[in-house]
């Protein structure tokens, strides 16, 4: 079975890359914001929805950056193959969610969400000059991080 994921690459005007720090099923991951394609949805529509759900942020989905071109098994379900699609995104308004300085800096409210749902997330900006494939955890994100660094 295929699991289609759609992610957004947001680089601020001051050259910082937006990442999501997530605590999922007892594990920590730093990844790009985005999520799963729902039935009846296009990839761009999915990404706009994910940014609204996760960050209450309206975005313009821009140019396609990358689609997985190698086999990647899901870290959560060995019967699923992951296909990830990445687009550049541009905020249509100011980011209102708190942006953290430290990795995995969850507040009490976010940890309460974790205890209810089994996952939580927070966001931070990493300066482009400090950003690399080591900044993210998922194998496909590492490929995209390298593409971002190459310009």
Image (spheres, helix red, strand yellow):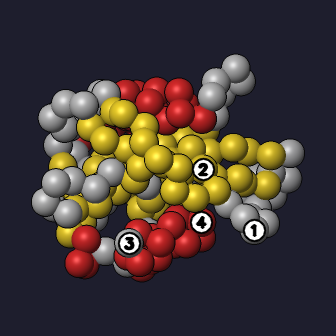
Q: Which residue is mark 1?
A: 70
Q: Secondary structure at mark 2?
A: strand
Instruction: First in sequence, mark 2 or 3: give its number.
Output: 2
Report the disc number at residue 151: 3
Query: Which badge, 1 or 2, comes first in the chain's sequence?
Result: 1
SS label for mark 3: loop
Looking at the image, residue 17 sits to the left or right of residue 79; the answer is left
Tags 1 and 4 touching, CB below 8 Å: no
Front-most of residues 65 and 132: 65
Distance CA(mark 1)–CA(mark 3): 22 Å
Dot 4 falls on a residue whose secondary structure is helix
| Dot placed on the residue nearer the N-terminal end, 4 or 2 | 2
Front position among marks 4 and 2: 2
Counting other residues with Cα less than 10 Å from the Cα at mark 4, is it few (<14), some (14-19), or many (20 or more)? many
Question: Where residue 39 appears, x then y in whole percent?
Answer: 71, 24
Name the disc covering residue 85, or none: 2
Distance CA(mark 1)–CA(mark 2)? 12 Å
Of callouts 1 and 3, the N-terminal one: 1
Residue 140: numbered disc: 4
Q: Are marks 4 and 2 in contact (CB under 8 Å)?
A: no
Residue 30 drawn at (x, y percent):
41, 62
Image quarter where the N terminus lies is top right
- Residue nearer the viewer, 45 or 137: 45
Report which quarter residue 148 is drawn in: bottom left
Relative to 107, is 30 on the left or the right? right
Q: Do labels 1 and 3 touch, CB within 8 Å?
A: no
- Residue 27 against residue 83 in the figure, above or below: below
Residue at 64% x, 56% y: name it. Answer: 67
């Amino acid at each position: 079975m295929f699991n289609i994921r759609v992610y957004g690459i947001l680089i601020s005007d001051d050259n910082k890359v937006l990442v999501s720090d997530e605590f999922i099923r007892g594990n920590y991951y730093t990844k790009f914001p985005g999520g799963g394609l729902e039935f009846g949805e296009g990839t761009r529509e999915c990404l706009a929805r994910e940014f609204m759900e996760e960050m209450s942020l309206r975005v313009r989905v821009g140019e396609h950056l990358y689609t997985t071109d190698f086999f990647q098994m899901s870290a959560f379900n060995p019967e699923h193959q992951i296909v990830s699609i990445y687009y550049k995104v541009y905020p249509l308004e100011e980011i209102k969610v708190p942006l953290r300085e430290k990795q995995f800096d969850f507040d009490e409210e976010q940890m309460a969400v974790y205890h209810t749902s089994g996952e939580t997330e927070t966001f931070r900006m990493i300066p482009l000059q400090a950003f690399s494939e080591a900044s993210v955890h998922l194998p496909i994100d590492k490929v995209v991080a390298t593409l971002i660094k190459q310009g």
